[in-house]
Image (tube, grey):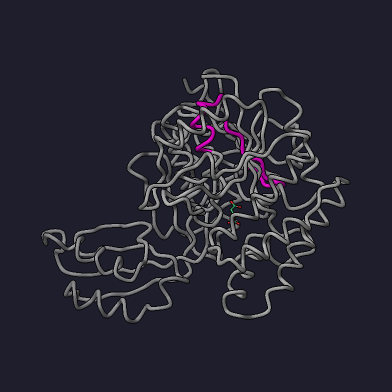
Amino acid sequence: MNTIVVSKFSGSAMSEAVYIKKAAEVMKSKPSRRFAVVSAPAKGSGDDIGVTDMLYICHARFNGRENYVSMLENIRGHYDSIIQDLGTNYSIDNDIDLLKEELASGKSADYMASRGEYIMAGIFADYLGWERIDAAELIFFNADGSIDEEKTFSTANEILMNTNRAVIPGFYGTMPDGNIKTFPRGGGDFTGGLIARSLNAKMFEKWNATTEIFRAEPSIVGNPEIARNLTYSEAIELNYIGIKTVLDEVIKTLRKAAVPITIHSLSNSEDSGTLITEEIPEGIKRSPAVCIAGRRRYSIVHMDKYALNKESGFGGKLFGVFAKYKIACEHCLSGIHRLSVVVKSPVFDVRRMEIMEELKSVLNLDSISIEKDLSIIAIIGKEMGRTIGTFEQAFAVLAKEKIRIRMIDQGSDELNLIIGVDDKDYNNAVKALYSAMILAAKPLNIN
Ligand code: ASP
């Protein structure tokens, strides 16, 4: 392990000059911060959409022979206002002229989208007085679109170990035929993670403009504590429930080389943020429940059939139907005569009648019914499973608030307890659980 820190700045962190200036201060505050990986500017306060969206629209309009020039001007305007506010001499006009030529020469949508980060890396590098290294020289895909890890790790390591400091555009790399390919939307973190892994970095940092990882939703509980320490697995659980830490795939990549991750907000840049590691560092005290998070608008589909527990292949057929309609079965609850599946209402509702008919006939059910307006609350913490009384405490808190529990699911890895409540009780349940299980809980020494 060396001393290099790789810092990834999200689209929000690059959206406006106020944040970009802070990002530059961050990069200059420690010599170990040698590589900044940047996203394209997300929408700023005056825009409806971010630069990546604008580039996709531009490409689509050009190819549909529609007027694309106004969109190109929006892109120029977005970068230009950043450049003016930064007070640099960077000229965006050359980039925009080049974009026009590239559109005319038939460049792909992926290529056009990649220019959002490429140009942003140029502006940020110029502001820092550092060099920009094109991600096309560092990140490589296999023909099937997966990452060519061997080539990426060795090439990026060789180039960057011989580079003092640089800004690298996120979100894209090179296909074996030399074409540019982008990661899925929001995939700028992939680049940061791969660079950190190539360098076996001391730390991978993710910087957002204002988003921090809180122990509960600020809009519900007011001013929650920041989650100081998480394990990689807990961070993936948080992603699932909608608190975006770092992409699951990036966590998996960094976990393999035990590269720690931190998450910070530029609007609170002095704060140490959230540290994510395999094990919670020695000496750290945490309450068994680490975060309380949740989502509204779920439904439970109940499938009834007498003695279905004896029927082999029931589950296979059931999941087959949901898979056919591309509906994720988020939780599954089983009884002797009933199997229930929790699904997201907005996705399920689109083809609800059709799916229910099909389940009924494929599984030869006695009956099928649906309960709506369910919210899911996840109480996350790796020590909960082995601490006596934590689940009892959660149920007692909800009983005291007269909140009906509609379902319970303890993940078999014991990382979380999922409780289903009525949508109307969601806010009260989160507030009550947060005050009892986090604010009032006694932190334990967990090692
Ligand atoms: N700019 C890309 C997007 O908007 C990638 C990213 O920001 O992570 O999807």
Q: Residue at x 73, y 61 (%)?
A: 97
Residue 200 on the magenta span: yes
Tally of marks? 0
Q: Position of residue 176 (x, y in %)?
A: 41, 48
Quarter assignment of residue 246: top right
Q: Position of residue 147 (x, y in %)?
A: 41, 44
Q: Which residues are magenta?
A: 193-212
Q: In the image, is 58 to the left or to the right of 123?
A: left
Q: Nearer the viewer, residue 20 or 373?
A: 20
Q: Position of residue 271 (x, y in %)?
A: 72, 32
Q: Nearer the viewer, residue 161 or 106?
A: 106
Q: Residue at x 48, y 41 (%)?
A: 250
**Above or below, comparing residue 104 to residue 208 in the picture:** below
Ligand 1: image quarter:
bottom right
Q: Residue at x 42, y 52 (%)?
A: 177
Q: Nearer the viewer, residue 400 or 387?
A: 387
